[in-house]
Image (tube, grey):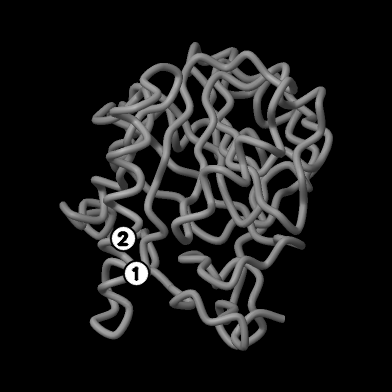
Amino acid sequence: MTTLPVNERFHTWQGEGCHLGKSAYFIRLQGCPVKCPWCDSAGTWHPDHLPEEVEKAEPEALAEAAFASGCEIVVLTGGEPAVHDLHELTYALGIRSLPVHLETCGAFPIRGAFDWITLSPKWDALPLDENLAEAHELKIIVEDETSIEKWVAELEGRHQIENVWLHPEWSLLNDESRKPQGEAVLAIISEWVKEHGSPYRAGYQLHKVYDVDRLDPASRPLVPLGGDPERGI
């Protein structure tokens, strides 16, 4: 049977998007070719932060662990989970009646059956039209005061997604030296939503406020790169 490289797997709740607050079992897969400078899960790809050992797990075992957790949904994330063939894992989860969610940048063909797809586009790996057509929600990371306009121009006419979340780039809100930039990003998100309304919605990573992931001992500490391009590879 196929195995998948797992960075971590743990029981928490979904901290963002349309399924905010739902009990969720997260399976974070190893590997990502996109390498964002503000990545908060750099342990999935950055050579300076790789774990000493990466679990090689069979889809059946992952599905059974998710089922045993009593979760409401299962979220496959990364890294970039779509670089892996997820057919066997989604099948194993599906026969246990577990709704399967995917978090992806959308730049790679999606292999597997999913009940919900969150697509968060990245400039270094733009989303495929076929994935935009399948996505249920968009999550745009707002890095500066021009980000929203740039993404709207890039994606114009390419999707009809009803929920477009505008998320402040997290490291801006946790670095005192970048606080003015972070405040400007929050302000531009607020004004954009007030002016344009649907499909745009103000987003946030509420699980980080609660620090809920760490309540499960299987969760690894975050590895934020802090928005520093020099720390990307």
Q: Nearer the viewer, residue 40 or 171?
A: 171
Q: Quadrant of the C terminus?
A: bottom right
Q: Residue under circle 2? A: 184
**Mark 2 residue element:** helix
Asked where in the image residue 89 lies, by quadrant, the reply is top right
Residue sitting farthest toward the left: 210
| Mark 2: few/some/many CA within 10 Å (<14, 14-19, 20+) | some
* Left or right: residue 125 compared with residue 28: right
The spot of residue 162 in percent (x, y) is 50, 14
Q: CA distance from mark 2 to mark 1?
A: 5 Å
Label 2 with label 1: CB-CB less than 8 Å: yes
Asked where in the image residue 85 lies, by quadrant, the reply is top right
Asked where in the image residue 56 lies, by quadrant, the reply is bottom right
Residue in the image at 29% along x and 85% along y: 177
Can residue 1 be seen from the camera position used here?
A: no
Q: Is residue 6 above or below residue 206?
A: below
Q: Residue under circle 1? A: 181
* Left or right: residue 223 compared with residue 46: left
Q: Is residue 41 above or below residue 84?
A: below
| Mark 1: few/some/many CA within 10 Å (<14, 14-19, 20+) | some
* Left or right: residue 76 compared with residue 34: left
* Left or right: residue 33 compared with residue 203: right
Residue in the image at 54% along x and 23% along y: 100
Residue in the image at 53% along x and 82% along y: 228
Q: Is residue 148 above or below residue 152?
A: below
Q: Amino acid at mark 2?
A: Ala
Q: Quadrant of the N terminus?
A: top right
The spot of residue 220 in percent (x, y) is 39, 66
The spot of residue 22 in percent (x, y) is 28, 27
Q: Amino acid at mark 1?
A: Gln
The spot of residue 198 in percent (x, y) is 41, 17
Residue in the image at 65% along x and 60% along y: 30
